[in-house]
Image (cartoon, rainbow, N blue to C red):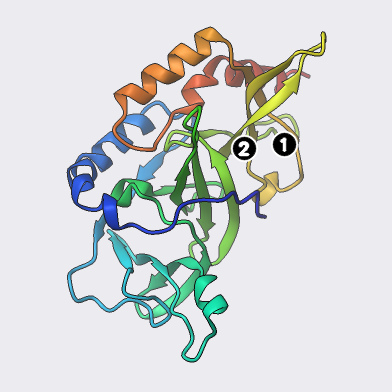
Amino acid sequence: MTGRMGAGARGFSCARAGLRAVAAAHLALAATSLAAAPCGPVEPIAVSQVLTGTPAPAQCDERAMGWITNDEYTIWRCGLRVPEGASGDEAESADDALIVMRGDVQVHQQPDFPSLWGDAGLVVLRVDLTGDDVGETVIAAHNTSGQGMGIEHWTLTVLGPDGSVLAREEEIADWGPAAFVPRAPQDGKRPAGCALLLTEWRDVEEADGTPTKHLVGWRAALGSDAAPQGDFVTRRYDRKFERERIRDIERTNGPERDPARWLKRQIAAALASEMKP
């Protein structure tokens, strides 16, 4: 269940010092954003950097940065060590990884483009995504910031209560911690829990052949929503939308965005439409 991985910058080094103040207010900002989520509850999970001297996973190099959640996981973002005796080409192509540990046990590892936003580039949430009244863990890892429109790209990983990977979505554009919507109807009824709203910027050809930019959103395929459902909502990037988005970016000290609010009217209309007999 992967999306599209774009090119990104490697490394953390130049961003660490100036971003510690951002991290201090990060959890409170996430909680404020989540108050606007159209379903829930969505619980922000506090993360803090591991103590100095905490050993990183053996496959990590000296650039490893780790965060511990307030419940059970430790999350590492690091470059992978080059095997001893590796050629120059192999050393040059060494990858970065995001590694999730539960105690001393590794439960997941995935390719990563480490965010220059440091602490502010990692968000952990707990939310029921399958309607069984048991929360899944959403790990949102910021990867890269684009040129031009300044689109922020994220990788979202969903872990089940046992630590198993239920979904991983890459290159999600302009994500934010309130990006959840009610789940798709089943047998004419709205099931419990939330669906993860995924977004991308897409060039759409209008009826007259003019290409325009749209923000398109769809529900993540997960649990009983696993069947492909296609696009859920879309909004044309006109002057009004552009001003709204720029204003939000100027007010935010970090890579988080608020697609659920930008698409609020479209989401309301889509929810009403899919409940019609």
Q: Indicate the position of residue 89 as horizontal and vertical percent values.
A: 56, 76
Q: Which residue is mark 1?
A: 186
Frontmost residue, 199 versus 79: 79
- Earlier in the chain: of badge 2 and badge 1, it is 1
Label 1 sits on a secondary structure element that is loop
Amino acid on which the number 2 mark rests in the picture = Pro
Q: Which residue is mark 2?
A: 191
Cβ atoms under marks 2 and 1 closer than 8 Å: yes
Q: Residue furthest bottom?
A: 85
Label 2 sits on a secondary structure element that is loop
Amino acid on which the number 1 mark rests in the picture = Gln
Q: Indicate the position of residue 10 as horizontal and vertical percent values.
A: 43, 57
Above or below, 117 against 95 in this view is above
Above or below, 95 against 265 in this view is below
Quarter of the picture holding the C terminus: top right
Quarter of the picture holding the N terminus: bottom right
